Amino acid sequence: VPTLFVHRDDIYEWGSAALLRAGGVFPYRGTWGGGSSGVITSAPANVEHVLRANFGNYPKGPYYRERFVELLGGGIFNADGEAWRAQRRAATAEMHSSRFVEFSVRSIEQLVYGRLVPLAERLSGGGAAVDLQEVLLRFTFDNICAVAFGVDAGCLADGLPDVPFARAFELATELSLLRFVTPPFIWKAKRLLRAGSERRLVEATRAVREFAERAVADRRNEMRKVGSLRGRCDLLSRLMSSAPGADYSNEFLRDFCISFILAGRDTSSVGLAWFFWLLAGHPDVESRVVGDVLAAGGDIKRMDYLHAALTEAMRLYPPVPVDFKEALADDVLPDGTPVRARQRVIYYTYAIGRDPASWGDDAAAFRPERWMRGGAFAGGESPFKYAVFNAGPRLCIGKRFAYTQMKTAAAAVLSRFAVEVVPGQEVKPKLTTTLYMKNGLMVRFRRRSPPPPSPPPRHVVADDDDDDDVAAGRHVAVGSCNSNHL
């Protein structure tokens, strides 16, 4: 019986313990991944070698691309080589422009104060329980659709309605991820026969692609009729309005935006869900977070302890618990471990964040203070021992956006409500490539008494300790871009 399924209920803890016993690296071999073999590691030096020092030898590779090709096509999340570099340059230029930063901050605030807080208010009145993970996934999906396409998906609208595009995207993602834990001879046979999960994947990805293609076609029509897209600041419109925009095919734009949604949907929602769960078990940390939020007067950049608590939560529960690269040529890792061409190097982010060699004897403890120095967020840890946002040339370009999104939502909720986890539920990770909670997270919102003052948001972008992704105009006044279409 494959080890993966023997330990399916504790795979991340088991893997972390195995790596600790093995000194941070061990080889694996089996038929489960189609005759795959390679190395699993949690050693930061090995991670740095793969993600930066010898980056050119470790692309995502065909194993990854094959499993996501129906959903992502050639989008940035599924690309290597020059195709990846071209999309990376385009994304960096647009996402770090002051107009896009302004627009993205406004879209976050509109959703937080227009939908998320009112939902919590309604639920607090009757004491009803709600799956917080589901609510947060709806919030981030609405937000990322607004930022990517300039459309309101409506997932967090009154009544939490069923949204066909969101349902199709979630199903397409889930079924694509299922391929990673299913023997290739099974899922490839089902794909050939258009049976079971593979038939549903085809249907779901068709719905996702048709939605994206309609958005691209609408922008093309608008450009023909109006002559420009100057009134829009969403990523799709900015790409089409850029200097090379005329050369972008509809397929390129479609795949780019779908990849952007996939990359932006899960990190914040999963990170926030585990953050709220950890706070419920650490009332001392919650009290300090709330005090930090109230003292900041609405300026999220001043919420250093909140920033530290979110960072600490993602250290223990990284949204992407494992990732891998595929070697092009034979190589030797810094610790002497050989890697053959076409083997995969799996870096175990979940284990890296819990390794006492990197984080001390209290590595398993939720302690935001480890990120604070002199009352301020210090950061400064190597991204190769904190690989939550990847590292090296593929460092997540949406890192600042994710922190802004998480801090805005957490501050708005925690300043108004206590988030109480419903007792008796089993909270554990789901066996997939994203660290979802297997059974969700049922909570109740209780209005804080007396209610705190509610200062207006200050329209700033969350800071972090990484200078690689410095965005232009981090402190900006929102309002220069028309967002009536949100």
Image (cartoon, rainbow, N blue to C red):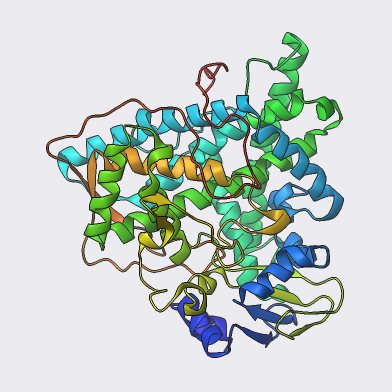
Q: Quadrant of the N terminus?
A: bottom right
The answer to whether residue 296 is above or below residue 313 is: above
* Residue nearest the viewer, comparing 137 with 69: 137
Residue most extreme to the front: 374
User: Looking at the image, which residue is at 71% across and 64% down?
Assistant: 51
Q: Horizontally, is 52 left or right of 458 in the view?
A: right
x then y, percent, for residue 78: 73, 54
Q: Quadrant of residue 246?
A: top right
Q: Horizontally, is 412 left or right of 267 in the view?
A: left
x then y, percent, for residue 328: 85, 70
The answer to whether residue 204 is above or below residue 97 is: below
Q: Quadrant of residue 227?
A: top right
Q: Horizontally, is 11 left or right of 245 in the view?
A: left
User: Looking at the image, which residue is at 40% across and 49% down?
Assistant: 376
Q: Horizontally, is 370 left or right of 184 in the view?
A: left
The answer to whether residue 10 is above or below residue 137 is: below
User: Looking at the image, which residue is at 44% across and 66% down?
Assistant: 316
